[in-house]
Image (cartoon, rainbow, N blue to C red):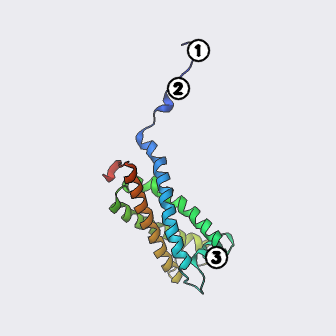
Amino acid sequence: MNGTITMTTAAHISSKTAAIPLYAVWGAAAGLVGGVGMGIWMSVSRPVMDTAMITMVAGLLGSTNAFAGWLIHLSIALFAGATFGIVLGPLAQRLAPALVLGLAYGVVWWTLGALWIMPANMGMPVFEWNDVTSSSLGAHLVFGLLAGATFASIAQAMGKRTGPAR
């Protein structure tokens, strides 16, 4: 043995465990694409008193600056995309399932973010249907479609089709 110690256990990682960080990276990229599309929607949509929805997002940090709104929004989109990749990545490697899952995921984030977290943080009524939340639903559906399509495209381009989506 000559006094050397070798560590062989560190090299044994299952392919499923190793895929999770890859799916998170693909999801983060997909989230950015979805976030840009959604951000454009929110920049042109003005459901209340000629105020762009992206500046409403800036209000989460007490700002009305559109650039701050974009930074907050894209940070959330990165997180949401990475989470999509980790949770749904194995099922979203083909386009049709990825689009359906993306739409559903967009609705989940709309419910959590636009109907609950954002209004609660801004002192507004939660789970209320109005011009802002209806426009926000459209924006979240755009996010989901683009994120799902992008994730599936990346997965197919990388040739990493594994799991039950086959």
Q: CA distance from mark 2 to mark 3?
A: 55 Å
Of badges 2 and 3, the one in the foreground is 2
Q: Which residue is mark 1?
A: 3
Q: Residue at x 33, y 53 (%)?
A: 165
Mark number displayed over residue 123: 3
Q: CA distance from mark 1 to mark 2?
A: 13 Å
Q: Quadrant of residue 62 in the image?
A: bottom right
In the foreground, 132 or 146: 146
Q: Which of marks 3 and 2 precedes in the sequence?
A: 2
Secondary structure at badge 3 equals loop
Q: Quadrant of residue 72 in the image?
A: bottom right
136 over 8 or under it: above or below: below
Secondary structure at badge 1 equals loop
Q: Quadrant of residue 117 in the image?
A: bottom right
Residue 116 coordinates in the image, percent (x, y): 55, 71
Mark 1 touching mark 3, by CB under 8 A? Answer: no
Residue 22 coordinates in the image, percent (x, y): 47, 48
> The residue under label 3 is which amino acid type?
Gly
Of badges 1 and 3, the one in the foreground is 1
Residue 89 coordinates in the image, percent (x, y): 41, 54
> The residue under label 1 is which amino acid type?
Gly
Secondary structure at badge 2 equals loop
Q: Which residue is mark 2?
A: 7
Residue 121 coordinates in the image, percent (x, y): 63, 71
Q: Which of marks 3 and 1 precedes in the sequence?
A: 1
Q: CA distance from mark 1 to mark 3?
A: 66 Å
Q: Residue at x 53, y 13 (%)?
A: 1
6 over 100 or under it: above or below: above
Specify the farthest residue to the bottom. Answer: 49
In the foreground, 92 or 160: 160
Q: Residue at x 52, y 66 (%)?
A: 35
